[in-house]
Image: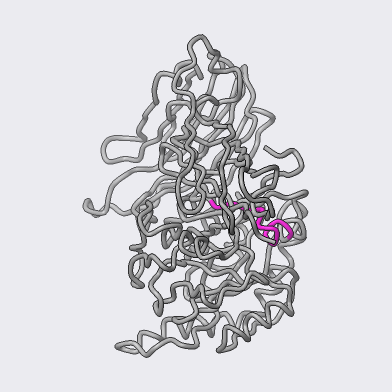
Amino acid sequence: MDSDYQIVFGDIHNHNALGYGVGSLERSIDVAQTHLDFFAFTGHASWHDMEPMEGQREQHWLKGFARLADGWSQVQELIADANRDPAFSAFLGYEWHSSHFGDQCVVFPEDHRPLVCPDSVAELRKFCLGERALMIPHHLAYPSGRRGVNWEIFDEACTPVVEIFSEHGNSEDDRGPLTFFNHSMGGRQTSNTVRHALGAGLRFGFVASSDNHSGFPGAYGEGIMAALVTENSRAAILDAIRARRTYALTGDRIEIGFSVDGAQMGETISRRGAVEVAFDVAGRDELDVVEVIAGGEIVHRAYPETSAAGADIFEAPVQLRFEWGWGPWSDLSLARICDWSMGIKVENGKLARFFPCLQSGPFDEDRRHRFTRVGENGLEITSYTSRHRAYRQHPNQSLVLEVAGSAQTRISLTLNQPASQTVETTLGELVGGSINRFTGPFPAEGYQWHRLTPRRASHVAGMCQLDIPDGHGHVYLRARQSNGQLAWASPVFIGYE
């Protein structure tokens, strides 16, 4: 990893009841502050070329736009107030829809800015340039005319990055995983993918955000972004986005270092010919593969170590995932929200870091997930789970612990709610397999300590040499964990002036 930067995680595209989602903005801010370093609220604002729908269903959207307009002064105040926390950054924004030009998220660098929704993409861009605001297209790969991206009007002047992934799915390619099926706009159109646009010579970085409509920024599996910053501040985060020093994630907070001839992700180098690619990827679970992609083709693959005879598994911190939820499915007509209260303690070791992996469902205005450090090695957790309206039918919450220790390091779990139980194990025992428990008879909820992941299985670093022919070129990195979670590092552009 580059020691000049720290990695911060955020979500700059999400919704609530100030639009046509659910939940208060106060809840969105609270959720974001619980597990993110930054976020932007981007309320639904307009759709100037929306066609009339059967049964006047367009009123669903129109009423949402009116709610944001009526509440805009409140939005400005709440976002500005959220920036009083020095460890957290909040950005004011809104979403502009267009069937023909594609949807755009406007993100302001400053507070207390106007809500302006012109009928022309040229006027929107002019406004964003005047405000020094970002203008970020999303769910790119939908078909043209159905709110897919319009690359013909792309301009990197205020669009340094594009949203490669969200709850809609993955826009990298038309054959990759996490296809589009959640909504009515159709499947992925080849010419609207990231791969196609990069091949046409356009220059942009990658971000992901949730586009969550349940007032839950940073929802696990729906998309978050990482920025490489010089400090954790709003100005530094904006600088990183404008420099394309960003990468996109589906959920797990994979840490990535990536450079080409020393140029960081997002940078441009004029050199052509042979270049050296360097990468350093630290996963939150077992890494499956790290791929270097140039000109739309996979040119290099790297894998974690499959064996290390005689090596000490605990010579570096390990990743340990704790997951809770499951419970009755809808066919049993037992839909319910299950409340959880529990504590985790590490003995004869160190709880170095922890990474919440929070699903957006179920929606609940009043419930919250909370993670509170108790001393150096303890953690108190309040949470809730349900299958009701869970994203892609996944009801669980989870947490990844980064633990430094030995085979004798003891992990204690004290469950207070929904049942009173205690489970004690060691890191040594978790090398061999998982521990699965239930809170009561079938079909009660369950919880699990996953088999631990040693550093050698979650870390891949290396180099490769590439020959870039004359003309424009780009190189980016894609990492995939064995649990399906993905990350895309912004390209380095080669041969551009």
Magenta-drawn stretch contains 246: yes
Instruction: Single out the residue that lies furthest toward the top.
Output: 310
Residue interval drawn in magenta = 239-248
Residue at position x 75%, y 70% from top? Answer: 110
Q: Nearer the viewer, residue 470 or 368?
A: 470
Residue 225: name its quadrant. bottom right
Indicate whether residue 429 is drawn in magenta: no
- Residue, far left: 331
Q: Position of residue 130 (x, y in %)?
A: 74, 80
Is residue 437 at all visible to an observer of this figure?
yes
Q: Quadrant of the N terminus?
A: top right
Quadrant of the drawing holding the C terminus: bottom right
- Kindly identify the residue that appears in the image at 56 percent across and 42 percent down: 466
Q: Judge by depth and name the residue closer to the eye, 65 or 302.
A: 302
Q: Residue at x 28, y 35 (%)?
A: 441
Q: Is residue 225 visible?
A: no
Tell me the residue at 61%/65% (across/down): 26
Is 493 situated above or below 76? above
Q: Position of residue 237 (x, y in %)?
A: 71, 57
Q: How many marks?
A: 0
Q: Tell me how the rendering is colored.
A: one colour
- Picture layout, residue 17 above or below residue 282: below
Q: Position of residue 154 (x, y in %)?
A: 57, 73
Residue in the foreground of this view, choosing between 298 and 87: 298
Q: Is residue 439 left or right of residue 310?
A: left
**Residue 63 in the image: above or below residue 484:** below
Q: Position of residue 84 (x, y in %)?
A: 77, 60
In the image, 108 versus 127, the foreground residue is 127
